[in-house]
Amino acid sequence: MKYKLLSLNVGRPEVYETEQGELESAYRKTPVQESTYLTFYNFEGDEQADKKNHGGRDKAVCLYPAQHYKNWDEHYGQSFSYPAFGENLTVDGIDEREVHIGDKFQLGDALLEISEPRKPCYIIARTHGIKDFPARVMETGYTGFYLRVLEEGKVTPGNYMTLAERHPSAVTVQDVNDVRYHDKNNPDKLKRVIEVDALARGLRDSLTQHLNKIKEAR
């Protein structure tokens, strides 16, 4: 399976005005037209303002499916343009319900592995001036996801993301969103997600703590 990279986006932290005051973030990224080198931590020219919650090996690359834009255009009655979700990669056709944690993809010269869903936060609401945006993203499951870099290399807009290896656990990105937002207290589902070796460590630790609390309460 392969999916076309429609937009490659990078950005550095900046301070910009929102309805609730100033916000420092690298959320507002800019599409680039040339080949860009991807390291184990980010694309050249891309940085994070909040290094505690963003970036690092497990969150080196943020991807958002291009087809979700139509949903948001229709739901909010306005036009969103790439990369409205602060993503590095806007990719056509890839879907949270079909790809798995640990799936590996070749993109240009780089090899990537899905590590966890993207968790929408207040920045998306403040950037677009839409208070319920994070809640709607969680409700729909149109979250996008993060990838870690297994092999560095150049990536060019228009490249195809080609599936290199399916993870045997078959835990989809949507499965993880399900235990995060909709079926939080299901120990069997939680255990299945936690056992995926490719799951980002921070999320695994958080879900494990929650599972232990459920067990203690029984």
Image (tube, helix red, strand yellow):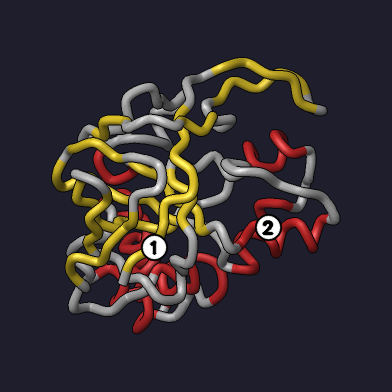
Q: Which mark is residue 119?
A: none
Q: Which residue is mark 2?
A: 135
Count of numbered badges drawn on the protein? 2
Q: Position of residue 171 (x, y in %)?
A: 32, 76
Image position of 59 with respect to 98: above or below: above
Left/right placement of residue 37 relative to residue 4 reads: left
Mark 2 residue type: Ala
Left/right placement of residue 164 relative to residue 36 reads: left
Looking at the image, which residue is at 71% across and 47% down? 80
Asked whether the viewer can see residue 204, the reply is no
Mark 1 residue type: Tyr
Image position of 9 with respect to 186: above or below: above
Looking at the image, which residue is at 44% across and 46% down? 89
Image position of 41 with respect to 14: above or below: below
Q: Secondary structure at mark 1?
A: strand
Q: Which residue is mark 1?
A: 3
Looking at the image, which residue is at 25% across and 66% down? 163
